[in-house]
Amino acid sequence: MARVLLRGGRVVDPAAGTETVADVLIDGGRVAAIGNDLAPEVTAEAEIIDATGKIVGPGFVDLHSHVNSIAGQRLQARDGVTTALELEAGLLPVEIAYDRAMREGRPINFGFSASWGMARAEVLSGRPADADFVGSLSILSDPAWQADSTPKQLGQWLGRLESELGDGALGIGILQGYAPRTDPAEYLAVNELAARAGVPTFTHVREIVEADATTPVDGTEEAARAAMEFGGQVHHCHVNSTSRRHIDRTLGVIERARNGGATITVETYPYGAGSTGIGAAFLAPERLPVWGITPSSIVIVNTGERIRDEAHLRHVRATDPGAACIVEFLNDSDPGDRALLESALAFDDGIVASDAMHVTWPDGSVDTREWPLPEGGMTHPRTSGTYARSLRMMVRERGAWNWVEAFRRCSYLPARVMDATTPAFAAKGHLAVGADADVIVIDPERVTDQATYLDSTRPSVGITHVLVAGEFVVRDEDIVADAYPGRGLRGQRR
């Protein structure tokens, strides 16, 4: 591994809460020294990078990424991400997921939770899991896996999840919002298992009561109750999209649970539109009024086609239920809706996470080693721009975060969510001697997102260098095409 000296940058360590001008020496995949007067013999033979006026900090840890590909991870690397984890949906079996990623190579670090959805589908739908997120989208419209489990079925898929934890899964991902009418006792059973195993759960909550008074239980209340009842660690995914215009109330539920001693963490992304498979239960035409949207609020990712009407929506759901789509639930350009997004970002100890989606090309392919990416690739802009957009909004424009706070929310806090299950995270999310050399260099005056809903693969700018384990994956704002230093991070049962 090369020795690299980042000279004269504004070095941010969110663990210590400090920002100081200093040199950072990287050696052997670790931060070897930090200081203003490093001895020449210490820095001998190091490649020198002038970081004057730049921000130097720990790489961003994304708790919610579905890209699972070289192409998607390169877009995330350009956005400052050095570790991208598939936790909300998870994959099954995780052994296959880790092996596949290592064989193909990854530019940034990766990891997977055990998939509640895939485990249920194996038992209730008879569909074997193959650790393929893109392929699994097609099952979202299948009513069989969304049904209540018999006691025997419950025991079977809980046992499957427990086995996955033994194989190194980072926790349990629960897509509760995709099976919104299942018995709440089943959700509690999963969280009881996780608490007993000492691992987090990562939940896409079911509908909230303001949107659907007939929901079996308010989704955010359910997550908070599980955290309080079993004393486990519950992570509430993308609170901005599941709460929509009721964000203040749902954040209040989380705050009260925390004040009562619950370990519940929360994430958000800075966009007014989400992305999923068009066969999702909550996108059935009769369910759209619950969301306050219409069929025309949905756009097919692969073609850019906007759904015309209810008949068109039913046709696409029936013929291609796994088609990735963008769902507009807030208007990014409306001041009121933008304020809602900013309030989610500003919530105490709120974590930034992207919910990044894979890139799809017109021929159906979802990955490539080519860089720049071939023309025609489409995804959600959050894949390319979540972190730079958050920095632009909250640091540069609003001044709501200083740089220490920005790195705390994007690097430090997400890494701490993983501490209980994955000891390797102790060396991530901070910048001090001995820390992993997952390091980024940012131009504070230029950093911004470029991706839009119509041009979604435009990389962020102003993130000058990205190193993973001390190796450049982004250099001078461009991808290093032959760099694949990413490693799998696996859980260890306590």
Image (cartoon, helix red, strand yellow):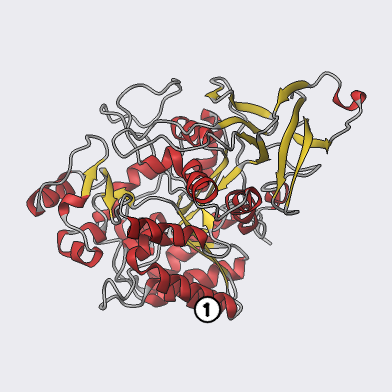
Left or right of residue 51: residue 164: left
Query: Disc 1 designates what residue?
Result: 256
> Percent x, y for residue 27?
79, 30
Residue 366 visible in this rendered orientation of the protein: yes
Q: Is residue 183 above or below residue 165?
A: below
Numbered circles on residues, count: 1
320, 476: nearer the viewer: 476
Residue drawn at (56%, 36%) of the image:
445
User: Quadrant of residue 39 in the image?
Assistant: top right
188 horizontally vs 309: left or right: right
Q: Looking at this view, is 84 or 15 the one in front?
A: 15
- Compared across the picture, whether 10 is left or right of 321 comes to right
Quarter of the image where the C terminus is located: bottom right
Q: Residue 94: x, y in percent?
A: 51, 47
Question: In the current view of this chain or complex, which residue is farthest to the left?
Answer: 311
- Relative placement, left or right, of 14 versus 164 is right
Q: Secondary structure at mark 1?
A: helix
